[in-house]
Image (tube, rainbow, N blue to C red):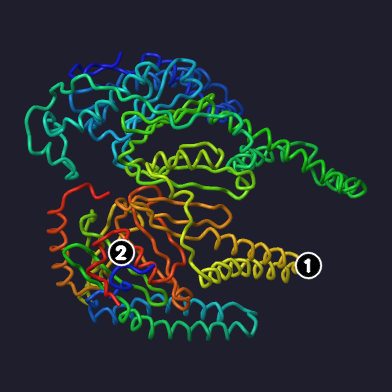
Amino acid sequence: MTDVGGTPVLREPANRVSPQAVPFWTVSALVGDAVLVVGALLVWLLVPGVPGWAGLVVLLLALVAAAHVVLMPRIRFRVHRWEVTDTAVHTREGWIGRQTRIAPISRVQTVDSRQGAVMRLFGLASITVTTASAAGPITVDCLDADTARDVVARLTAITAATEGDAT
Amino acid sequence: MIPEPGEGFVRLSPLKLLLDPVKAVAQAVVPLVIALVGISRSDTKFWPIILPLVVLGPLVLGALPWLTTHYRLTGTQIQVRSGILNKKTSTAPLDRVRSVDLEASLLHRILGLQKVQIGTGVDDDRITLDALAAADAQALRTTLLTRRAVAEQAAPATMGRPDGLSPDQPDQPDQLAQPDGSDRPVVPAPLPAPAVPLARIDWSWLRFAPFSLGRLVLLFGGLGVLSQFADDLPIWNQETATSAWQWLTQFAVAAIVLVLSVSALALWLVVSVAGYVLQWWGFRLVREHGSLHLTSGLVTTRSITVEEAKVRGVEMTEPVLMRLVGGAELSTLATGVEDGVTQVLPPCPRGVAVAVGEAVLERPGPLIGRLVEHGPRARRRAWFRQLRNALDVIVLFAVAWWWFDLTWWWLAAIGAALLALAAAAGEASYRHLGHDLAGAHLVAGGGTFARIRTVLETDGIIGWVVSQSWWQRRAGLVDLTATTAAGTERVLVRDVRLDVAVALADRATPGLLTDFLDRV
């Protein structure tokens, strides 16, 4: 299965996401996990007659949640990368698994950017590039807001210049 | 008569005045009966008000669409106007017409009518003309399809800009270059290309009907409805059930089971064969005007047209039971049809499916050629995946077993059966696995029990997704997904080695990955 010029290896995309993404992901994970753990804790405290091992389960849950909050953002920051060339968009994401997505800019149909309230707090924005396939949307999470604006402008300019109905 | 290009708006067939009230009554009959029963129980003084409403309502409601719906052809467009208060005009440029489907329910056929659906490549937006006289519908279909072909050929020379239409996709640069007259009757008499028959029904194919389980769902649905009624039967109460059960246990249980299974089998034979006949009666698949044209149906006739330029590939499915008897099904993967997967063949011999598939693809090989295997690690993954699913179910059963306090051998038996099934499924799904790049086609093999082979033109690939779960990362395998606008919008090559996947993607779409590759 080798091609001319040796085995091709997919290199990682050139750019990291904004370093602000780490605190943002930490806060998001913290909020989500806290709800879960507090809920479990309340059940354990308030429901009468829960068996003794339920406390152990709650403790385990809290430990897992803490590990998630601490580790996930850091791993994710190392994994998430993106690159936009004149011909293609290339991203990598995930933290336990990995997803690499590549789409030719000539097939891009829409370019959206999104900034939630918490994201604005950290000066972040996400870009989503869609193609005509439901399986194909590419999201670059947590870019620096200024970078995001530039990338959107650049993508829109390139896609406007390409012809064809993108299917 | 359908209107000539440039003529004014015309109405749909006047027989619609008969069609719609009957349909409205049929749709309203259940709520009406319920309402009537409810009212008759409560009070009778409302009857003089309600009866005329019940009778006149459907008539008026049925007449309105006919009175308010008009359509016309211009030189470049088909326009449909409808609505009373909210007037709506749907317009489709003729060169954007991707499909013209005709459908006739039993009622339509009694009245000699057909429903016309015109697809324009925008997913959910189809123009429906319900209903035209059958001859008009055929004429309209031929006109639209031939005109589309001519319009496309003649586009650089004669096409004007479609009037009142935003050029939403930069698809037709030639049109935009000539912003001249709009409703000009273009198009000289087209040369009708001869229709090439690709397949027609062969009643020996009926042998595949019982092995195609798609209708089993319908059967269970029907049984579900019946059981609703059974609940209401007076004999079905606790006492009769108990005494019946005692009677049963005294009787030879084996004999009962035998009779039940034989009758279920017989029922299934009847239902499946009848369903096959109803759906595929008079089936023909021809290629004409650059489209695939399928007609079939005994009671409700369907006529489906798929533009070949929009067909990006085919998918051949061999469900496990059908494989026992050498049968297969074939679908085309197209863009711009609201459901991109169109089944173009009934369950039929594999050879026929392959032949038709190759005719559609216009190249021999991809449906039968050997695939590149994914190797022992992929086999381990396939086994592991199925065994893990089985374990999940076994855990559920174990909880149930603990909860209901059943005997342990139930659990053991179910567990053993599930594990054996999982092993079989794992091995089967590995054997179906594979990929190939046959010329300009990406071929992917997959499916767990059914063997599914998907062939996609590499031109139709609009991106790649390489995804790895944690387990796959440990094994160095990836799921490679080619994204596309056609069919189910993705073609999955599962559990392939990372380097093989990258090489495959690189060869399938030359240039796309170049910027991101290092050669070692």
Q: Quadrant of residue B269?
A: top right
- The kind of residue on which mark 1 rests is Leu
Relative to B403, is A156 on the left or the right?
left
In percent of width and height, residue B381 lies at: 53, 70
Using the image, determine if residue A157 lies above or below residue B290.
Answer: below
In percent of width and height, residue A65 lies at: 45, 82
**Image quadrant where one finds the N terminus of chain B:** top left
Sequence-first disc among 1 and 2: 1
**Image quadrant where one finds the C terminus of chain B:** bottom left
Label at residue B375: none
Taking the view exactly as shown, the residue that stands out farthest to the front is A4
Relative to B31, is B193 on the left or the right?
left
Q: Which residue matches tag 1?
A: B406
Taking the view exactly as shown, the residue that stands out farthest to the right is B250
In percent of width and height, residue B305 lies at: 37, 32
Q: Nearer the viewer, residue B442 or A24?
A: B442
Residue depicted at 29% across the width and 68% down the height: A4
Q: Which residue matches tag 2?
A: B506
Q: Nearer the viewer, residue B498 or A104?
A: B498
Relative to B40, is A138 on the left or the right?
left
Q: Chain of mark 2?
A: B
Question: Local crowd at mark 2 within 10 Å, few (<14), some, or many (≥20)?
Answer: some
Q: Comparing marks 1 and 2, which lies closer to the viewer?
A: 2
